[in-house]
Image: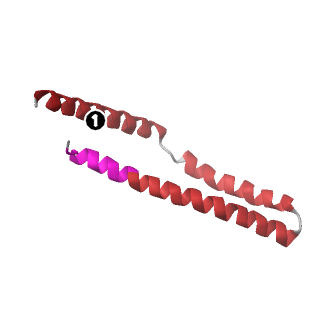
Amino acid sequence: MPCSPSQTRYARDGAGFQKARLRTRQSSSFVGPLIVGLIADSTGNIRYAFFFLVVMVWLAVPVLWSVDVEHGRIDARTYSVERASEGAQAQQLHVES
């Protein structure tokens, strides 16, 4: 069964998101421990690495505060309604043919 343009768009957007998430996860699992190790090696004390970790957490706070949760809910509902209606249309076409 051929995909509708909106299904193709969502699949393409989802694949791009997954690639970005994978790259971010891989780089953060490499860079964070590297920096902590460099701090521990250069100072001779691993406790100073906690300052780096605290700074990284506080840098993430404005990003998290900028997320519009209500807009995300609306987008999720719209997406699920579109998917449900597309599924019903596809099912109806399958029954008719």
The colouring scheme, among rainbow, by chain, secondary structure or one colour, is: secondary structure
| Residue at image coords 79%, 56% | 50
In which image quadrant can residue 41 be found?
A: bottom right
Asked whether, in this view, residue 84 is left or right of residue 32, the answer is left
Task: Please identify the dominant SS of the magenta region.
Answer: helix
Image quadrant occupied by the C terminus: top left
In the figure, is residue 92 to the left or right of 17?
A: left
- Residue 71 against residue 53 in the figure, above or below: above
Question: Residue 7: x, y in percent?
Answer: 27, 45
Place of residue 42 in the rendered image (x, y in percent of width and height, measured from the top left):
83, 72
Per the image, label 1 sits on a secondary structure element best described as: helix
Instruction: Residue at the far left: name it.
Output: 97
Picture quadrant where residue 70 is located:
top left
Instruction: Please state the total of marks drawn on the protein image.
Output: 1
Residue 75 quadrant = top left
In the orientation shown, which residue stands out farthest toward the bottom? Answer: 42
Q: State which region is magenta.
A: 2-14
Quadrant of the image containing the N terminus = top left
* Residue at the (40%, 56%) spot, across then down: 16
State the residue in front, 92 or 6. 92
Question: Does the magenta run of residues contain 27?
Answer: no
| Residue at horizontal 24 percent and vertical 35 percent from the top | 86
Left or right relative to 65: residue 40: right
Residue 69 location in percent, x, y? 48, 39
Q: From the viewer's perspective, is residue 62 above or below residue 26? A: above
Dot 1: few (<14), some (14–19), or many (≥20) neighbours within 10 Å?
some
Question: In the image, what residue type sits under mark 1?
Answer: Glu
Left or right, 26 with reference to 7: right
According to the image, label 1 marks what residue? 82
Outermost residue toward the right?
A: 44
Q: Which residue is drawn at the image coordinates 72% and 62% (left, top)? A: 33
